[in-house]
Image (spheres, rainbow, N blue to C red):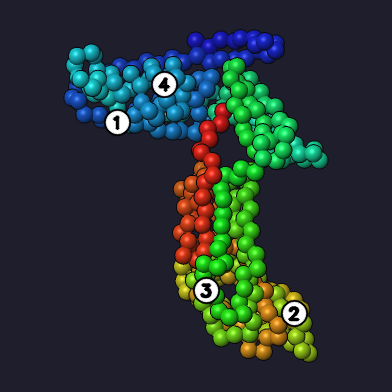
Amino acid sequence: MATYTTNSRGQRQYRPGTSVTVTTSALQSGGDAERGIIGVMYEASRGGQPKVPWSATSAGDLTANLPANLAWIWSKLLFSPGKPGTSPRRTLGGAGSVVFCRVNPATQSTITLNDVGAVGALIINASDWGLYGNDIQVKVETGVDDVTAKLFTAKYAGVEYEIEGGNLPIVSLLYDDTFVAKPAGWAVTAVEATIAPNAADGDVATSVSYAFTAPTDIARDPSTWMAFDGPVTVAIGAQTAGAARDVIFTGVLKEDYLTESAGDTVTETLNVLSADSATTARSWSEITSIDTDDALEGDATFTGYAFALTKYTASAVATYNTATSVIDRINQKTARGFAATALSARSTFL
């Protein structure tokens, strides 16, 4: 049953109870095979985001989403309803799948850690929704040096969890400029990775940008030594009589453009004014040819994203919201000189 309690800091907390009525008589008539889908609406002090359904097909799924005592009870009722001795595996008539939905209101506790300028630098969220998150304590640590520094310490139920920082990144990224051959006069001048850990759903959370230069030249294929994931910007220096120069791109569209569809192979001529820059109207997933103007004076500089990985946490779209998915995507381009590696084990936060 639901209760109200007062913690050591004088906070009055509502702890919802759980009432479950399950009859297994209809399930048992089906024999040993799991069958049927059951829906469960519940109130609990912990156990998932309210009003967001989730499903389970085994007891293991329950322990990953519910408090241990509730997961144990429901695993017996829903997946092992048979009496002792009726089945060696105690799965007589168990449900094939159960859809859960938490109905009591609850929020996810959060705290923002500020940098030295009192600007939010890191947002920490409790992994579950409920009042328990108010009891998680966070302390910003002061490190002795850049290598051994601890970012912060979290404490819950008397147990401390130290999160180390310093020079230990989650992902190590390499672009080996010597690994791939480029045409004479073409040079990669910069490759830079950026990770936005608090990026909003639908925004680019991990990006790798490039910069390379090219002289006047015949059409060349850059897909053997560079990746492309978006529009390309071209800048040129001052030209005689202020003349504009054309750069011709051929490649595969990343997104629909006018009457063209993503995945189409198309060509775009980009007109760049003297001592200026211009950006392609199209977004590319691949570029197979760049043809610089025969009259180009000096080098043209090309900039853009080799990887622009969008974060989706609640969508059926392909997602890049974990270090593993980011690493896998980058390593698809190892033949072009890119390589990514995880330097720390997967962490589980409160």
Disc 1 and disc 3 in contact, CB within 8 angstroms = no
Q: CA distance from mark 2 to mark 3?
A: 26 Å
Q: Secondary structure at mark 4?
A: helix
Q: Which residue is mark 2?
A: 237
> Which residue corresponds to the image point at 45% horizontal and 19% vertical from the top-left?
68
- Of the two numbered discs 1 and 3 on the same chain, state the one appearing first in sequence: 1
How far across and down, in percent of the image, does residue 168 sit?
61, 43
| Residue 27 appears in the rendering | no
Q: Quadrant of residue 268?
A: bottom right
Q: Which residue is mark 1?
A: 96
Q: Quadrant of residue 14?
A: top right
Position above or below: 115 against 240? above
Q: CA distance from mark 4 to mark 2?
A: 67 Å
Circle nearer the viewer, 4 or 1: 4
The local crowd at label 4, few if under 14, some if 14 to 19, many if 20 or more residues have their Cα within 10 Å, is some
Q: Which residue is mark 3?
A: 181
> Which residue corresponds to the image point at 65% horizontal and 38% vertical from the top-left?
165
Circle nearer the viewer, 4 or 2: 2
At label 4, the amino acid type is Ala
- Of the two numbered discs 4 and 3 on the same chain, state the one appearing first in sequence: 4
Q: Is residue 184 left or right of residue 56?
A: right
Q: Is residue 345 left or right of residue 234?
A: left
Q: Secondary structure at mark 2?
A: loop
Position above or below: 100 against 242? above
| Residue 324 appears in the rendering | yes
Q: Which residue is mark 4?
A: 71
Disc 4 and disc 2 in contact, CB within 8 angstroms = no
Q: Nearer the viewer, residue 128 or 180?
A: 180
- Of the two numbered discs 1 and 2 on the same chain, state the one appearing first in sequence: 1
Q: Nearer the viewer, residue 134 or 176?
A: 176
Circle nearer the viewer, 4 or 3: 3
